[in-house]
Image: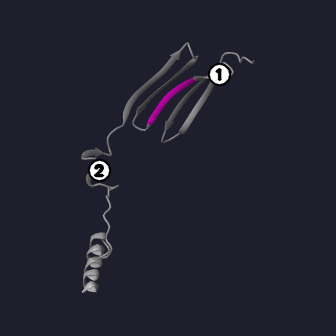
């Protein structure tokens, strides 16, 4: 009798663990190629063909710590333009102007302002 109860218990445990019916395990699946160019992410429709466009600005001017930096960037479709600056440890300011597009790739021009201070 003990053997029958043990066998039934094992069968129930195996069925609950998902080892029966081909060992199916549940996985969440998100389609990377949704129909008609839109999908669902978190319950919200995603339009993968919309025209990306944004502007971004950020800056810090802290006279107490000497932390002075900025960044700005714009994007219109596949064209990104921007610049950023920061104060180097030697006291000079590095300014980087960059552009990126699908034809020319990423291009940056680095500029230094000021005179280095050596301690």
Answer above or below: position of 4 versus 35.
below
Residue labelled with disc 2: 37
Answer above or below: position of 33 versus 110.
below
Residue in the image at 46% along x and 23% along y? 58
Answer above or below: position of 44 versus 109.
below
Q: Quadrant of the N terminus?
A: bottom left
In the image shown, does 33 or 16 lie closer to the viewer?
Answer: 16
Q: Between marks 1 and 2, how big is the CA–CA gap?
A: 45 Å
Q: Residue furthest right?
A: 119
- Examine the image and state in which quarter residue 52 appears: top left
In the image shown, does 39 or 68 lie closer to the viewer?
Answer: 68
In the image shown, does 43 or 22 lie closer to the viewer?
Answer: 22
Residue in the image at 28% along x and 47% along y? 42
Residue in the image at 28% along x and 85% along y? 3
- Tell me where residue 25 appears, x and y as whole percent: 32, 67
Q: Which residues are magenta?
A: 79-85
Classify 10 Å Cα crowding around label 1: few (below 14), some (14-19), many (20 and above): some
Residue labelled with disc 1: 112
- The reply, left or right, for residue 56 in relation to residue 118 is left
- Tell me where residue 47 appears, x and y as whole percent: 29, 44
């Amino acid at each position: 009798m003990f053997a029958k109860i043990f066998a039934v218990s094992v069968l129930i445990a195996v069925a609950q663990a998902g080892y029966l019916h081909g060992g199916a395990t549940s996985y969440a699946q998100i389609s990377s190629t949704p129909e008609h160019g839109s999908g669902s992410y978190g319950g919200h429709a995603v339009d993968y063909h919309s025209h990306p466009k944004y502007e971004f600005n950020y800056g810090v001017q802290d006279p107490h710590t000497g932390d002075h930096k900025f960044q700005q960037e714009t994007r219109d479709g596949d064209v990104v333009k921007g610049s950023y600056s920061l104060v180097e440890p030697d006291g000079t300011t590095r300014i980087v102007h960059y552009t990126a597009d699908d034809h020319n790739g990423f291009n940056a021009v680095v500029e230094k302002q000021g005179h280095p201070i050596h301690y």
